[in-house]
């Protein structure tokens, strides 16, 4: 026989139980951690146990670190929750950065312009309303053009990010504390006007509570409401949606409004509670990381809690590793990259079965790389 | 059929896609210097079989011999190495490149890239077989037939001596078809093996030396074209004439329900799909719509359902009190509220009528999710409906939580029908209701349709099987090229007459076969 049968055969799986799929993902995470450890041992000559304990230390080492961890998770989770309804509709909202910045800008404006002029509780509400409106508008503009003229939402929302960043940069110059510093410093440092309340002595507890509430809201919204059902149908098939009389345009616009509004809430929290200042890098790029979190979690808000924890954990751990084990800062990014590579790569094994060549066409199944 | 000098021998070839058996232990010989017609209905596995020869699919079981040597064709490249070239229905050409560039694209024979020399070779191939190709012409400037020629030359350029053409005439005018056939004969005379996939009988008679017939993935037989005739081939293609015995109850108190007047519809490209169509559909009757596929049937149903933009004309829905209400200009939602249900969407049960990734009960919800005043969906009613449909129509499914895309075609159809009739419509629009279904499932569907009819529903039934249409319908509307070609009583309708109306307006003189 001149040519041999192919060594491996890929067959699309028609069905895999979700339990089995999660086992494969779990194995992938474990395998990636083992691989990271071995790699660290091989090139950095660092004991993997030391590596992981340093990572652990970086995240859970002190009470403060735990709160920072929680605050970061809230920020990432919030934006992930925000993009999810749009994603479920197969509308790729990559504009969480811009929508969040728009909300942050509105919040800042309220704090600076109204600080001291109205009572704090009223100011908080005004800040929230304007942040939600600003974020919603930022999400609505691309949605309107998509629904009306069929523009591509991916590019449109992406470009809106740059517009928002430039707007923020512009206002920072207007509000800068010392001329030429391009820095507005801590807003209302003396009066603390507009600073969101500290609950139970914990500065970040408010963020955690609000984001937790939003997560539960989104879970219910997507799963049990008529709107959530419409989003599902539009995402699966616009033709079916039209056939049963759903107004596809309206659903697109409504969902993007919601998506932008929640981004606005995140901006409100970032300025009003976490940072008390506005910078162009306020979101730390979480608006893009959120895309990954949402996908990794199969658009399920509850799973996103875990996914955003994983990403933030790796990120925080990496900076600790860099300082305490004197490894390069980028090394942490490499480790995060490896974990993600395994996690995304294992989807291949969830979607396909790998069949090896056997003498009698025996079927074997491989689960993990 | 001794198979000794066969260019290709396929033995026991089996290919399955999930639970669908596309080819089942197929034996096929292809000879040099012969044109073989591979005949079969849609979905009989012709293209799948040839795709395995050209390296696109790999068979699950079976052997392929080329010149009596067993080979494993694992990629199109290996197929080419064995001299096998396939011309697909959908051309695979780069629009912005010239003919010559497309022909040499991807070719790596070790020699220097020389477009001039390639053009020379292309010209000599063209001369040899009688093609007309300008090597320097860009693809985007070409007609469909020219593009096809480029595809054929591309295959010959690579030294193919086994050529497979997948329904090559589907896109050609009669004159172009004649030219193609002349070229194919030249290639046969040159000693090449030619396979042409088709389901048109007259082409088989016209061009082929031998005909092999597939039915439902199985090889039914082959014979010399000269020694057979259209009737025999048809019988082999569709199987033994099934004695149909579909019930046709007498209409119950028929009254006009849908009145279509002078309806004209254009598609997005501005092509007229329906031209001045008028007819009446009565309650308690089945109106069968006959016509060659693509003659406006889809547009007609979608216009009534409010999914199609209407250029002119009117569609009146006549309610129980006898008052007409205009449907043109209404959206699907309000039309549904009046009791018009469009079900069994052609080809696209999963793309339009149902959502493949959703489970049965969520699909039931498509029609009913708006019910209730709260923002939340009621999942219990659809769940119950799904269970009822599964029980009453004996849908075979692991559970009502199974995504519908995992069900077989017949079961998907039952789910869709079950949901549509559950809303107790007064008008039921059905398109290709039994396409792809086995006999038993088909009869279940006929029974359901008859049951609706007996309850006074006006049924509009678009079908492709003329025998069924004639047995089921009370009235028959024949469409031809978007115009009404005939409107006749179903009882006592003559199949030949309807067939003629389908091919020619009014069914004038021309006789088929």
Image: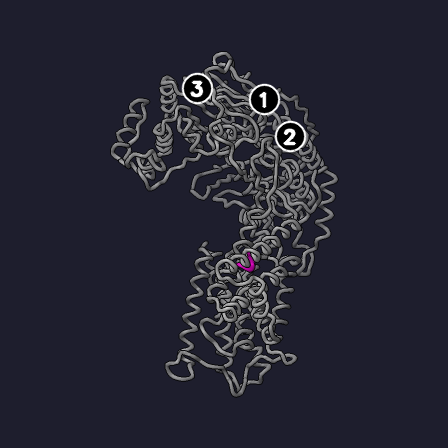
Residue B349 percent coordinates (x, y)? 59, 40
Residue for point 68% across, 30% down: B440
Q: Residue lying furthest top in this view? A: B227
Using residue B147 as the reference point, say whether residue B407 is left or right of it: right
Q: Which residue is mark 1?
A: B494
Q: Are the two marked residues, 2 and 3, in contact with CB atoms closer than 8 angstroms?
A: no
Residue B188 percent coordinates (x, y)? 39, 19
Q: Can you tell which mark lies on residue A310?
A: none
Q: Nearer the viewer, residue B473 or A224?
A: A224
Start-end of magenta stretch? A291-295
Q: Are the two marked residues, 3 and 1, in contact with CB atoms closer than 8 angstroms?
A: no
Residue B128 percent coordinates (x, y)? 30, 22
Q: Is residue B97 magenta?
A: no
Q: CA distance from mark 2 to mark 3?
A: 33 Å
Q: Which residue is mark 2?
A: B438
Chain bearing mark 2? B
Residue B434 percent coordinates (x, y)? 62, 33
Q: Is residue B512 visible?
A: no
Q: Residues within 10 Å of mark 2 (few under 14, many from 20)?
A: few
Mark 2 and mark 3 lie on one chain; the one further toward the N terminus is: 3
Q: CA distance from mark 3 to mark 1?
A: 36 Å
Q: Which residue is mark 3?
A: B35
Residue for point 57% across, 27% down: B217
Chain bearing mark 1? B
Q: Is residue B186 visible?
A: yes
Mark 2 and mark 1 lie on one chain; the one further toward the N terminus is: 2
Chain bearing mark 3? B
Q: Quadrant of residue B134?
A: top left
* Disc 3 with disc 1 on a shared chain: yes
Location of residue A351 with respect to B15 vertically, above or below = below
């Amino acid at each position: 026989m001149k040519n041999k049968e192919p060594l491996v055969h890929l067959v699309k799986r028609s069905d895999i139980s979700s339990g089995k799929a999660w086992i494969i993902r779990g194995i992938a995470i474990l395998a990636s951690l083992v691989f990271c450890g071995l790699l660290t041992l091989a090139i950095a000559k660092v004991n993997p146990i030391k590596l992981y304990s340093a990572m652990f230390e970086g995240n859970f080492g002190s009470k403060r670190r735990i709160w920072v961890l929680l605050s970061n998770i809230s920020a990432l989770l919030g934006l992930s929750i925000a993009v999810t309804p749009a994603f479920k509709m197969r509308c790729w909202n990559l504009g969480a950065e811009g929508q969040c910045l728009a909300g942050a800008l509105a919040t800042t404006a309220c704090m600076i312009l109204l600080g001291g002029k109205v009572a704090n509780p009223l100011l908080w509400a005004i800040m929230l309303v304007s942040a939600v409106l600003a974020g919603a508008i930022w999400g609505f503009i691309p949605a309107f053009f998509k629904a009306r003229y069929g523009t591509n939402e991916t590019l449109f929302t992406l470009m809106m990010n740059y517009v928002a960043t430039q707007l923020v940069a512009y206002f920072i110059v207007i509000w800068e504390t010392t001329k030429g510093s391009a820095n507005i410093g801590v807003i209302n440092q003396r009066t603390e006007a507009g600073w969101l309340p500290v609950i139970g002595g914990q500065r970040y507890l408010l963020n955690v509570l609000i984001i937790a509430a939003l997560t539960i809201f989104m879970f219910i919204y997507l799963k049990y409401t008529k709107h959530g059902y419409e989003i599902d149908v539009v995402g699966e098939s616009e033709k079916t949606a039209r056939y049963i009389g759903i107004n596809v345009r309206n659903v697109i616009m409504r969902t993007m409004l919601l998506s932008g509004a929640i981004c606005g809430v995140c901006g409100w929290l970032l300025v009003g509670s976490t940072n008390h200042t506005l910078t162009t890098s306020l979101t730390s790029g979480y608006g893009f990381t959120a895309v990954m979190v949402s996908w990794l979690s199969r658009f399920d808000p509850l799973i996103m809690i875990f996914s955003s924890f994983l990403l933030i954990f790796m990120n925080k751990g990496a900076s600790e590793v860099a300082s305490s084990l004197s490894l390069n800062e980028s090394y942490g990014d490499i480790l995060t990259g490896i974990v993600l590579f395994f996690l995304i790569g294992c989807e291949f094994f969830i979607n396909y079965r790998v069949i090896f060549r056997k003498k009698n066409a025996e079927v074997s199944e491989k689960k993990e790389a | 059929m001794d198979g000794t000098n066969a260019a290709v021998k396929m033995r026991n070839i089996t290919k399955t896609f999930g639970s669908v058996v596309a080819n089942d232990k197929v034996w096929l010989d292809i000879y040099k210097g012969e044109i073989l017609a591979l005949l079969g209905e849609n979905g009989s596995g012709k293209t799948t079989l040839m795709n395995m020869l050209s390296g696109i699919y790999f068979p699950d079981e079976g052997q392929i011999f080329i010149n009596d040597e067993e080979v494993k064709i694992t990629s199109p490249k290996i197929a080419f190495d064995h001299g096998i070239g396939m011309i697909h229905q959908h051309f695979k050409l780069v629009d912005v490149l010239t003919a010559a560039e497309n022909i040499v694209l991807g070719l790596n024979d070790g020699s220097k890239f020389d477009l001039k020399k390639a053009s020379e070779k292309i010209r000599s191939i063209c001369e040899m077989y009688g093609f007309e190709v300008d090597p320097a012409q860009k693809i985007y400037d070409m007609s469909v037939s020219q593009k096809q020629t480029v595809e054929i030359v591309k295959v010959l350029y690579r030294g193919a001596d086994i050529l497979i053409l997948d329904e090559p005439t589907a896109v050609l005018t009669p004159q172009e078809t004649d030219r193609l056939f002349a070229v194919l004969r030249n290639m046969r005379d040159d000693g090449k093996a030619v396979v042409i996939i088709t389901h048109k009988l007259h082409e088989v008679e016209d061009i082929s030396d031998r005909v092999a017939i597939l039915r439902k993935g199985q090889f039914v037989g082959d014979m010399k074209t000269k020694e057979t005739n259209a009737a025999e081939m048809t019988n082999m293609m569709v199987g033994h004439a099934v004695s149909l015995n579909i019930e046709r109850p007498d209409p119950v108190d028929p009254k006009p329900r849908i009145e279509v007047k002078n309806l004209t519809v254009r598609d997005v490209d501005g092509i007229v799909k329906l031209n001045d169509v008028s007819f009446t559909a009565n309650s308690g009757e089945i109106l069968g719509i006959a016509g060659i596929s693509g003659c406006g049937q889809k547009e007609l149903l979608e216009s009534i359902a409010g999914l199609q933009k209407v250029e002119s004309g009117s569609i009146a829905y006549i309610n129980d009190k006898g008052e007409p209400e205009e449907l043109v200009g209404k959206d699907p939602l309000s039309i549904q509220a009046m009791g018009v249900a469009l079900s069994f969407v052609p080809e696209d049960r999963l793309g339009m009528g149902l959502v493949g990734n959703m489970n049965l009960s969520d699909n039931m919800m498509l029609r009913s999710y708006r019910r209730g005043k709260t923002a939340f969906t009621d999942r219990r009613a659809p769940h119950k409906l799904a269970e009822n449909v599964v029980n009453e129509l004996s849908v075979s499914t692991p559970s009502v939580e199974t995504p519908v895309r995992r069900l077989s075609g017949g079961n998907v159809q039952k789910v869709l029908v079950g949901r549509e009739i559950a809303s107790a419509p007064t008008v039921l629009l059905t398109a290709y209701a039994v396409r792809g279904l086995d006999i038993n499932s088909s009869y279940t569907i006929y029974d359901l349709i008859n049951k609706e009819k007996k309850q006074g529903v006006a049924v509009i039934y678009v079908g492709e099987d003329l025998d069924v249409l004639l047995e089921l319908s009370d009235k028959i509307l024949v469409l031809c090229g978007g115009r009404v070609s005939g409107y006749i009583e179903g009882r006592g309708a003559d199949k030949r007459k309807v067939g003629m109306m389908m091919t020619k307006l009014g069914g004038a003189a021309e006789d088929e076969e």
